[in-house]
Amino acid sequence: MTQAKSPFNVVFVLFDNVTQLDFTGPAQFLCRMPGAKVHVAAASLDPVMTDVGFGIMPTVTFEDCPQADLLCLPGGLGVAPALSDDALIAFVRAQASAAQWVTSVCTGAFILGRAGLLQGRRATTHWGYTNLLPMVGALHEDARTVFDGNVVTAGGVTSGIDFALTIIAHLHGEDVARSLQLNFEYDPAPPFAGGTPVTSPPHIVQAMQTRFYDARSAEMEAALVATA
Amino acid sequence: MTQAKSPFNVVFVLFDNVTQLDFTGPAQFLCRMPGAKVHVAAASLDPVMTDVGFGIMPTVTFEDCPQADLLCLPGGLGVAPALSDDALIAFVRAQASAAQWVTSVCTGAFILGRAGLLQGRRATTHWGYTNLLPMVGALHEDARTVFDGNVVTAGGVTSGIDFALTIIAHLHGEDVARSLQLNFEYDPAPPFAGGTPVTSPPHIVQAMQTRFYDARSAEMEAALVATA
């Protein structure tokens, strides 16, 4: 257990078409971490449109954001276009240089990668994109949350909740993490086993791959090539 | 499996100091249910402040909201004050009268209760408040998601994700639910067993109860008495 400083600034970076649960899941748990203050940073204070169709109000602009102790990049379909957003990438790079923890959920990993932060690191991302990790110099590790030094990457979407609890346990110990699990009644009971390509029925994996992820992964690859 | 109509209007009702994951968790899954359209309804289109400290932009006002096929009330510390918000309660009652499904996550159950919608129903809510369910005429059933006719109530916060998947499986079958679990990589791996008063260590439950839930439950009880 490491002693965390207080206030401990948790900074989430938002961009249009973010998969909102990548951010809202870990934010719910991290905002109750002792001493933590959650900031939602974006280019301006205008609402950021999420993938669900509602906007989220940033709490701070890139310009006015305090130094993050924990920086977190969520993912989503907005990542590919965000890779060519120079202001966003510069913000991530500058914040990461002094953050205690540099983290991502889902395809947010590719924003870290684009900023040069995954070079030589073990990392993970959403299962539909893990094959692209070498394009940003990372080695895929097959785990829900991957620690490599101060860089922590999580798998797709709902992984963000487990990632947050893992960080909380690491910084504040088991009792605090257990208290927050109880507070948010986190005793998950998915109706079906599955949720990964290995544990889902093959016809489901095949359908998701051909209907969605072949095209999405190609789009991300093109964006990575264009911004390399 | 019931055939769902398309568009299938999913209406979440927001109010200040909502526990945002009560809403954002199920919204993430329900927005990808075939034919579904998610609406975020509030008294006005001004941002609604969440418990995490960021605002969410409603997509529609109570006045302009289409008839919900599935109405969902999230919970949070904002529920007790919302019980005396006559416009919100009237909206919930009117929507519920023609909705296919009337649902809640966490302490959102007490808004349904205040609107008279839990009378004689089996229901659940966040574990810290289950003892108050008889005040709104409901009988507590100890389950993560409780179906009683067209009324579906879920337990605390993260229960909302399992609730959404259960509804999706009910309306669209196992393959659609499994596909969305895979899409959002929902293969939860909490760092510790627990998350309920029965499965958490007694000293954790005791501490959460005395530090938080005794006072919160008393506040809800007073609000229920005041608006009965």
Image (spheres, coloured by chain):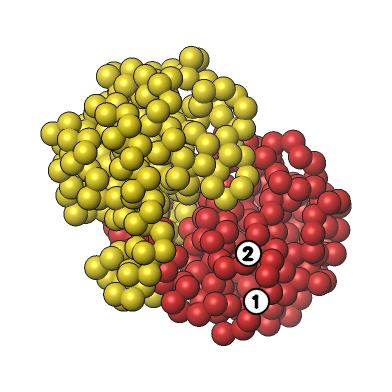
Chain colours: A yellow, B red
Q: What residue does disc 2 label?
A: B36
Residue A210, above or below A173: below
Q: Nearer the viewer, residue B213 or A160?
A: A160
Element under label 1?
loop
The residue carrying pointer 1 sits among few (fewer than 14), some (14 to 19) or many (20 or more) residues within 10 Å by Cα, namely some
The residue carrying pointer 2 sits among few (fewer than 14), some (14 to 19) or many (20 or more) residues within 10 Å by Cα, namely some
Q: Quadrant of residue A227?
A: top left
User: Does residue B138 show up?
Assistant: no
Q: Residue at x 69, y 36 (%)?
A: B47
Element under label 2?
strand
Q: Nearer the viewer, residue B123 or A190?
A: A190
Q: Residue at x 29, y 18 (%)?
A: A98
Q: Tell whether label 2 touches label 1 (CB within 8 Å).
A: yes
Q: Position of residue B181 (x, y in %)?
A: 41, 65
The N terminus of chain B sits in image quarter: bottom right
Tell me how far mark 1 sits from mark 2, CA to CA: 9 Å
At label 2, which amino acid type do we have?
Answer: Ala
Q: Position of residue B84 (x, y in %)?
A: 81, 50
Q: Quadrant of residue A90?
A: top left
Q: What residue does disc 1 label?
A: B4
Task: Give the mark, 1 or 2, whose residue is nearer the N terminus.
Answer: 1
